[in-house]
Image (spheres, rainbow, N blue to C red):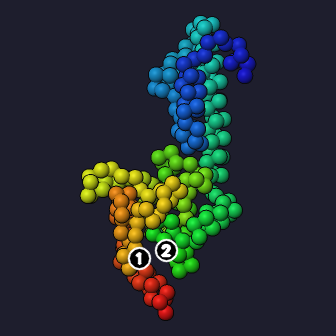
Amino acid sequence: MEVLMATTTLSPVYDALLDYLVEKATPQEIFAFSISDEAAHRAHHLMDRNNAGTLSSDEDAELQQVLYLERLVAMLKSRSLAAFSRMVYLSDSIRQHIRERASGRCEYCHEPEQISLHGFHVDHIISQKHGGSGFPDNLAWACPACNITKGTAIASYDRASGALVPYFDPRGQEWEDHFEMDEDVILGKTAIGRVTVKMLEMNHPEKIETRRWLLKADKA
Ligand SMILES: [Zn+2]
């Protein structure tokens, strides 16, 4: 911290970093930080002058700041990467919590996990690409079909209204408010329901077949 303490004014790149950290707190976003082209250009210029031995004392102080900043950013990125890894590789206890919270069924298409041949996935409701966190309030239990078709998308155009509509959010919304069952078909009751049914292919022939089989087993 010596360099920081010794200087009375901070290089604008510090402001940029500090503002960024205040605004964007997720590890992914911290990891994505990069200094502006202008600041990078200035740093190269200072390095060149330093190598040529023509650096003034003010410029030398500025260069020390830049070098310190580089180390600081490297440390921050290393920490954010570690935090991100912890979020991605969810512990067994968090997976268990998410599975139990969903009562063991897909929070989108409601398929029960016990009839699935493949393990269910932990879905990021708002994908990490869009800044979604790895915390349980952004996670849902999803069958592989819903999770894979959803991908990193978070919204789509509703054909009926033409509006851009976000997908169903199992944490903030009630399934029954947006979907209803018509025998073996899931219908969207709202624009949110409609885009989610369509984009997650919730009425794919294989899904319908599974539901028919379940309905039959229920009646038996
Ligand atoms: Zn599903």
Of residues 140 and 121, the one nearer the viewer is 140
**Residue 220 visible:** yes
Instruction: Write the residue at 61% across / 12% down.
Output: 9
Residue 185, position as x, y percentages in the image: 37, 75
Instruction: Write the residue at 46% across / 26% down.
Output: 37
Q: Residue furthest right?
A: 2
Of residues 30 and 172, the one nearer the viewer is 172
Secondary structure, mark 1, is helix
- Badge 1: few (under 14), some or many (20 or more) residues near its Cα, within 10 Å? some
Residue at mark 2: C-beta within 8 A of ligand 1: yes
Alpha carbons under labels 2 and 1: distance apart: 9 Å
171 versus 129 height, above or below: below
Residue 173, position as x, y percentages in the image: 48, 57
Tag of residue 111: 2
Instruction: Write the residue at 65% across / 24% down.
Output: 68
List the residue tagged with mark 1.
207
Question: Which quadrant is the N terminus positioned in?
Answer: top right
| Total numbered badges shown on the rendered structure | 2
The answer to whether the residues at label 2 and label 1 have Cβ atoms under 8 Å apart is: yes
Instruction: Write the residue at 48% across / 71% down.
Output: 110
Residue 167, position as x, y percentages in the image: 41, 56
Q: Residue furthest bottom?
A: 220
- Badge 2: few (under 14), some or many (20 or more) residues near its Cα, within 10 Å? many
Residue 24, position as x, y percentages in the image: 55, 36
Residue at mark 1: C-beta within 8 A of ligand 1: yes
Secondary structure, mark 2, is loop
Identity of the amino acid at label 1? Lys
Residue 114: quarter of image: bottom right
Left or right: 37 with respect to 101? left
